[in-house]
Amino acid sequence: MSQQINLFNPVFLKQKKYFSFAAMLQAILLLVLGCALLSGYAKYRVVNLRKEAAASQVQLSIFDAQLAKAKVDFAPRGKSAALDAEIQKAEAEMKSLDKVFGVLQSGDFGNTKGYSGYLAAFSRQIIDGIWLTGVNLAGAGNDISIQGRAVRPELVPAYMSRLKHEPLMQGKSFGALDIQTPAANPNGVKTAGPAVQYVDFNLR
């Protein structure tokens, strides 16, 4: 009968050295290389950040200059003394014109529409046997004087009655009426034929 004897002992195996000098040297080299790479990247980032910061500073300076210029250009302006004086002058002129317009409208200044309407009224209401020799108008038409002649004295009141129908004569009345017979041949000149019979009248 045979018997096997195991003479293997793990203690006698060659042990692998994990922390050998070569391994440690490689590890240190890798670590140094990694630090160098990290340092280089950090320096690269710092340089770029400084460039960006410088560019931002320049841009900020430009913005500050633009803001200062905008504040000067669009600063709230004070009241212009010259403009205020012009406004006051224009208001004073407007008030003066309003006063003048009020005076003209009231008729205190006189007749601003002219007297052609009165003359047309006198001519429209004329009747046969009467002719006018003079018309005096003063103010706003409140003072009227009419001189004329009539072949018969009774025609004068009829003419006065017809004048009252004119719109311009509404509210107006004649306060005095003089009717006179003209003197015959006042210059002493004799005329052939019968003398013309008429009377002079004056309405006021």
Image (cartoon, helix red, strand yellow):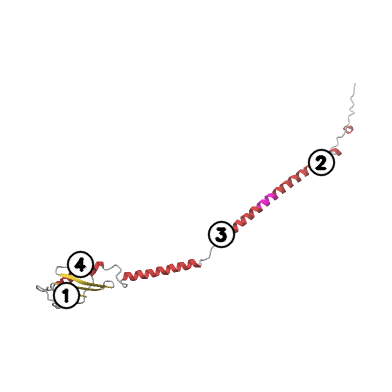
Q: Earlier in the sequence, mark 2 or mark 3?
A: 2
Q: Which mark is residue 73?
A: 3
Instruction: Identify the residue at image location x=57%, y=58%.
Output: 70
**69 versus 133 height, above or below:** above
The one of 58 and 148 positioned closer to us in this rendering: 148
Which residue extends farthest top?
1
How far apart are the alpha carbons under marks 1 and 3? Answer: 85 Å
Which residue extends farthest left?
193
Q: Earlier in the sequence, mark 2 or mark 4?
A: 2
**45 versus 86 height, above or below:** above
Amino acid marked by disc 2? Leu
For discs 2 and 3, the disc positioned in front in the rendered view: 3
Q: Earlier in the sequence, mark 3 or mark 4?
A: 3
Instruction: Identify the residue at image location x=84%, y=40%.
Output: 25
For discs 1 and 4, the disc positioned in front in the rendered view: 1
Q: Can you identify the residue that label 2 sits on? A: 29
The part of the chain drawn in magenta is 50-56
Amino acid marked by disc 1? Asp
Residue 37, image x, y percentages: 76, 43
| Dominant secondary-structure state across the stretch colored magenta | helix
Q: Which mark is residue 200?
A: 1
